Image (cartoon, helix red, strand yellow):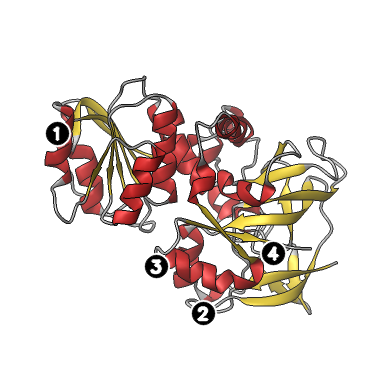
Amino acid sequence: MKTTAAVLRTAGAELSLEDVEIENPRPTEVLVRLVSSGVCHTDLGVIATATAEQVPVVLGHEGAGVVEAVGDDVRGVEPGDHVVLTYNFCGSCDNCRNEVMVHCRDFVPLNLTGARLDGSSPLSRNGEKIFGHFFGQSSFSRRVIATEQNVVKVDRSLPLHLLGPLGCGVQTGAGAVLNTLDPEPGSSIAVFAAGSVGLSAVMAAAAVGCSPIIVVDPQQQRRDLARELGATHVINPDETDPVTAIHEITGTGARCSVECLGLPTIVRQALECLQSPGMCASVGFQGMTNELTIDQGHLLFGRTLVGVIEGDSVPAKFIPRMIELYQQGRFPFDKLITTLPFEQINEAIDAAHHGKLVKAVLTFES
């Protein structure tokens, strides 16, 4: 079978739309026809830094679509089901058995290599291997091979063209609040950076009754959107020291914080703005090696700094929870999204890279 995929062949280059061969699903795999796919900063990072050993590759890891075929051992979904694609995990290691899938023992090879555990890929072109299993999906393609583990069935009445980002970016920000921090109503919270992840954290904080909700971002447009989505206070860090301002707003410091950049100065601010006790969830990423310097006194006197991957989410439970909040009008993640046709993928990537859009989502027309 053939499909059209956006292929990265050289780091920093534009993606090329190519006709490629896609395998039939193996026993535990699922063939999905995509309706939409979000563009995430993890994709942008690989585009910028991919080595010769990592290309050619099809990226994308926020897919949503319709199941077309399933392997012989698949029981959870069937052809015709609507699904959201999320991160991949083995389902059998100790962490997966304890529902800590984000720390699956094989998380890196299953998600970041673009290949199956055996090194194979479901995509090829004229005999050339193309890495096509990024996050168990490679959703910059009209059809993808995913696994039974990383597809979540959703109601057919839901708008699939909007749901893709629930599988990663939106899940990351919302999960950092709802799963990791789990604040009580009335808890003060500060969110550093109002991109799609940070604004998802803001919506989650509003949904559970946090107050005040303080957002730190240099862009006026992002601060305005944060207010629309539930922020009670906004801070321009180019004009005001966030740590001082947050302590003034709260009187004691924030009960919790979410930082979405991973820059050492921002992580430190997100920790230092806390009251004691308080917890900072760090979801930003600046590469596998990213040294931080913090004052140990902040930890000794009751502050916690915790790293968060994929919102500490069990996708089969958390994606339905976000959808339920959305249907109740308490989690309007659709306000983050701008849709573009798949053929404009390079324009979408450029817009995401330069912050012109909060969340770019590609749509696939048949």
- The disc labelled 1 sits on which kind of residue? His
Rounded to the nearest whole Å, what is the CA distance between mark 4 and mark 2?
Answer: 17 Å
Most foreground residue, 186 or 254: 186
* Depicted 45 relative to depicted 191: above or below: below
- Indicate which label's residue lies in the foreground, 2 or 3: 3
- The disc labelled 4 sits on which kind of residue? Ser
Rounded to the nearest whole Å, what is the CA distance between mark 4 and mark 3?
Answer: 23 Å
Q: Kindly state the secondary structure of the residue where label 2 is placed.
A: loop
- The tag earlier along the polypeptide, 1 or 4, is 4
* Depicted 83 relative to depicted 313: above or below: below
Rounded to the nearest whole Å, what is the CA distance between mark 1 and mark 4?
Answer: 47 Å
- The tag earlier along the polypeptide, 3 or 1, is 1
- The disc labelled 3 sits on which kind of residue? His
Q: Is residue 350 left or right of residue 165?
A: left
x and y, in percent, of residue 31 in the image: 79, 53
Q: Which residue is mark 1?
A: 247
Q: Which residue is mark 2?
A: 13
Rounded to the nearest whole Å, what is the CA distance between mark 3 and mark 1?
Answer: 31 Å
Q: Kindly state the secondary structure of the residue where label 1 is placed.
A: helix
Mark 2 vs 3: CB contact within 8 A: no
Q: Is residue 192 left or right of residue 30?
A: left
Most foreground residue, 226 or 19: 226
Q: Which mark is residue 141?
A: 4
Rounded to the nearest whole Å, what is the CA distance between mark 2 and mark 1?
Answer: 44 Å
Rounded to the nearest whole Å, what is the CA distance between mark 2 and mark 3?
Answer: 16 Å
* Depicted 132 relative to depicted 10: above or below: above
**Quadrant, the C terminus:** bottom right
- The tag earlier along the polypeptide, 4 or 2, is 2
- The disc labelled 2 sits on which kind of residue? Ala
- Indicate which label's residue lies in the foreground, 1 or 4: 1
Q: Kindly state the secondary structure of the residue where label 4 is placed.
A: loop
Q: Which mark is residue 354?
A: 3
